[in-house]
Image (cartoon, grey):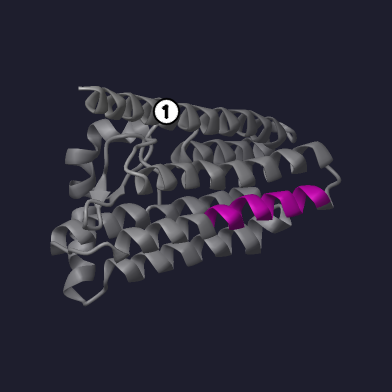
Amino acid sequence: MVDPPGGTLASRGGGATRGTVRIFNVVARGGIPRVFGPLSGWLLRRGVSPDAVTIVGTCGVLVGAIAFGARGQLVIATVIVTLSAFTDLVDGTMARMSGRRGKFGAFLDSTMDRVADGAIFGAVAYWLAGQHRWSAEVAALICLTAGQIVSYAKARAEGLGMTANIGVAERAERLIIIGLGGLFGELVWKYALDVALWVLAVLSVITIGQRIATVYRQDQAATAQDAARVGR
């Protein structure tokens, strides 16, 4: 359930990719199969599909966000969401182990990511509104909107034959920042969540700009190449 920054962690077929936070990419090749391989194999032997794991993980995120996060129980919400997010590593490993082809798994994964993101930031915004912390609520809504745009920009670029695997706040970073903000906000300092949301809002907007600029440069380069060919 992560928007990959460049490298990939797992594939769901047809060249579509899954990824996880950058700091994990270095150890992912060796570490992830060792950690999640046995569980993935056990699930496959019992007829569980990667898509089922994707859906279960999303449901877990919904429970954590709506049932707990929206009520201000940020620690337990963060724990549930984090554990549910690990299913993304499991379903990706399962897809590799089963040799699955086709593109539906990648499509489902991306769609469920958007559902999960909406639940997380929507729940946080809802709770903050109830606490009359209007500034933080605005930041949460910016994060919600910008996060969707970040993911859309990448998907649209790829649909046009270009890439947009760049940005200081991709999905993994967004989840880590909001998670840490929630934990510190409940355990250490009340307004840590507010600060985290505004930092994330700024970084998300910057990421949108980075992706727009990247696609613009690619389009300009392609246009120049086409013009050069015509001029020959």
* Residue at the bottom extreme of this rendering: 47
- Residue located 67% across and 41% down the image: 142
Q: What residue type is labelled 1?
A: Thr
> Circle 1 is placed at which residue position?
214
Q: What x and y, as percent, mark residue 77?
A: 59, 54
Q: What x and y, as percent, mark residue 69?
A: 65, 55
Q: Is residue 204 visible?
A: yes
Among the 4 quarters of the image, the one containing residue 62: bottom right
Mark 1 Cα-neighbour bin, 10 Å: few <14, some 14–19, many ≥20: some
Q: Closest to the observer: 163 or 232?
A: 232
The image shows residue 228, relative to residue 150, as above or below, that is: above
Residue 120 in the magenta stretch? The answer is yes
Residue 72 in the magenta stretch? The answer is no
Q: What x and y, as percent, mark residue 170?
A: 46, 37
The image shows residue 92, relative to residue 196, as above or below, that is: below
Label count reads 1
Which residues are the magenta region? 116-129
- Residue located 45% across and 60% down the image: 111
Q: Main secondary structure of the magenta part?
A: helix
Q: What x and y, as percent, mark residue 151?
A: 47, 45
Position of the C terminus by quadrant: top left
